[in-house]
Amino acid sequence: MTGANGQVGWELMRRADKFGVTAIGMTSTELDITDAQAVAAQVQKGAFDVVVNAAAYTAVDKAESEPEKAYAVNRDGPDNLAQACAEADIPLIHISTDYVFDGSKKGAYTEDDPVCPVSVYGASKEAGERAVRERLARHIILRTAWVYGVHGHNFVKTMLRLAKERDELRVVADQWGCPTAAGDIAEVILSILARYITNQAVEWGTYHYCGDGPITWHGFAEAILVAAEPYGGRKVPVRPIATTDYPTPAKRPANSVLDCAKMQAAFAIAPRLWGDALQEVVQEITHQTAPE
């Protein structure tokens, strides 16, 4: 597994045993996925049952000024992994994003909706998806959204920190999506892995998985502070603002809600209410600080 120190990678490592999966995790310093030779040397026939790519360039705004870096990790990296997997006859599970869509649709996006990214980050991730599809038949591309967790940097941790420092928060209220706990994404991937390893049928292709229930960033911020209150979190007013009031280098989709029906039909995995997952994550963050 690549990206072992990322939000999802970290959760995959700590949950693998529960699913009877032996996970060999590699950080970016241990395996640079942009190095085709290094990837080919690592991904050898018979070495692994499955490769999971949890590595990504995720700095959405920074990607606008660093497109080469974003494309190297998000397009060339998956391309290298898919090529190596094809030669070694190993399937690949690759994590992608809701930001491959432009946000103009009314209602939730399905896997068959046309992609139209509006940022360098989204475009680089979409290019990575295409590379995987072109190189390797046995793949799962798992699109997810608004990822947060105990480990690493994310919106939940930022809101908890800012609530301690400020008397009021101002958060965008006209972008809709589905917050998704990194631990839930890890469990979905491990469930699919366990199914494959025990010789159960796996329908390869592109799938959506995210937390259940659309919300705005503003609504999510309010929920975070409410969840943290029992653990000594400071609850301050959260003022709704428009995207135009908070200009960022990268454009974000106004709607990136994902439809997860295909995942449920193929693997009997239902999306989890994001509020339930949030309670668990906030409790763990406030009670203990995970190693960064």
Image: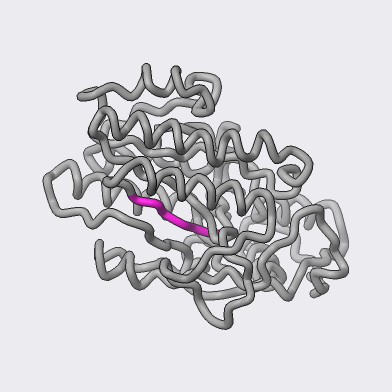
Q: Is 132 placed above or below 117 here?
A: above
Is 6 left, or right, of 133 in this rendering?
Answer: right
Q: Is residue 38 above or below residue 173?
A: above
Query: Residue at (61%, 39%) from the top-left corner?
Result: 71
- Could you say which is closer to the camera, residue 201 or residue 77? 77
Query: What's the residue at 71%, 43% (across, down)?
Result: 63
Using the rendered view, name the quadrant where residue 278 is placed: bottom right
For residue 198, side relative to residue 67 (left or right): left
The magenta segment: 140-145
Res. 90 visible in picture? yes
Asked whether 143 or 147 is in front, the reply is 143
Q: Position of residue 49 (x, y in %)?
A: 23, 33
Q: Residue at x 41, y 33 (%)?
A: 81
Instruction: Look at the image and tell me in which quarter the N terminus lies.
Output: top left
On the rendered structure, is 216 left or right of 283? Answer: right
Above or below residue 219? Residue 87 is above
Task: Give the camera-side residue of 208 and 113.
Answer: 113
**Quadrant hosting residue 289:** top right
Is residue 226 something one can see in this rendering?
no
Residue 120 picture location, percent across and down: 68, 49
| Residue occupying image coordinates x 54% and y 71% | 257
* Whole-percent x, y for residue 153 in the image: 65, 43
The picture places residue 196, in percent across and down from the top left corner, at 19, 46
